[in-house]
Amino acid sequence: MHELLNTYCPNLMTKLPDFYESIAETLQMVVRSGWISFMIGLVLGILLTVTKKGGILENQIVFQILDKVVNFFRSIPFIILLAGLLPFTRMIAGTAIGVEGAIVPLIFGTVPFFARQIESVLAELNPGLLEAAKAMGDGPIRIIISVYLRESIPGIVRATTITTISLIGLTAMAGAVGAGGLGDFAIRFGYQRNQVDVTYASVLVLVLLVSLIQLGGNLIAKKSTH
């Protein structure tokens, strides 16, 4: 097997430590920025839902501000967002390169997308459940937890799966500006040095990651559907 890999992937085999480090960096970026984005995006999605017209906490001022902020960041291509956030990233993370420098722009690139996903999921909730909760005298916080979130778990899982897969794509894009990870590895060696086997190996790992996340998301969504 080792001889076979040396024959067909000679460049990759000489860079295995860098390859493994790149995989670890990609996982770090996905886990760290994904977790923070999940928390912020979930809160934003809930606020967008409950403050819009007809929501249980209708407030047009709050809704319009959040709606415009989310639309603003969603409209900026991620590669431009990376460059535009450089001063802010240096201020928050102390650096704009490597894994640490990628976390901040990844959060800004992921949160608006996930917030819209959550808003869409919560909008599909059966209105009869909300009316029943109100009739029983439940307050807004209890309705959010017991009705919106509890009844929407499968949809939230699917939204999280889609967002995580999108986040993996953003980490690869962040590699173009020295963020590390598989994107950076593929660009430095696969593209700039024309080492095709390195590019294919990076793509293969990314495909495996996406497949595993999609499989896990589908299983959890299926188990949580009632």
Image (cartoon, rainbow, N blue to C red):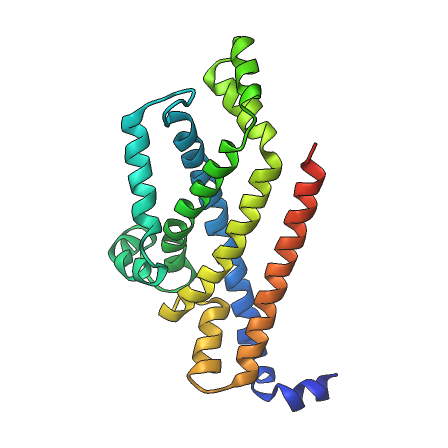
In the displayed image of the protein, which residue is found farthest to the right? Answer: 1
x%, y% of residue 147? 56, 23
Q: Nearer the viewer, residue 85 or 200?
A: 200
205 left or right, relative to 223: left
Instruction: Give the quarter of the figure containing the N terminus.
Output: bottom right
x%, y% of residue 88? 27, 52
Q: Is residue 76 above or below residue 142?
A: below
Q: Is residue 159 above or below residue 24?
A: above
85 left or right, relative to 42: left
The residue located at (34%, 43%) in the rendering is: 70
Instruction: Give the quarter of the figure containing the C terminus.
Output: top right
x%, y% of residue 192? 42, 83
Snapshot quadrant of residue 14 = bottom right
The residue located at (39%, 20%) in the rendering is: 57
x%, y% of residue 21? 54, 69
Q: Is residue 191 above or below residue 79?
A: below
The residue located at (59%, 28%) in the rendering is: 150
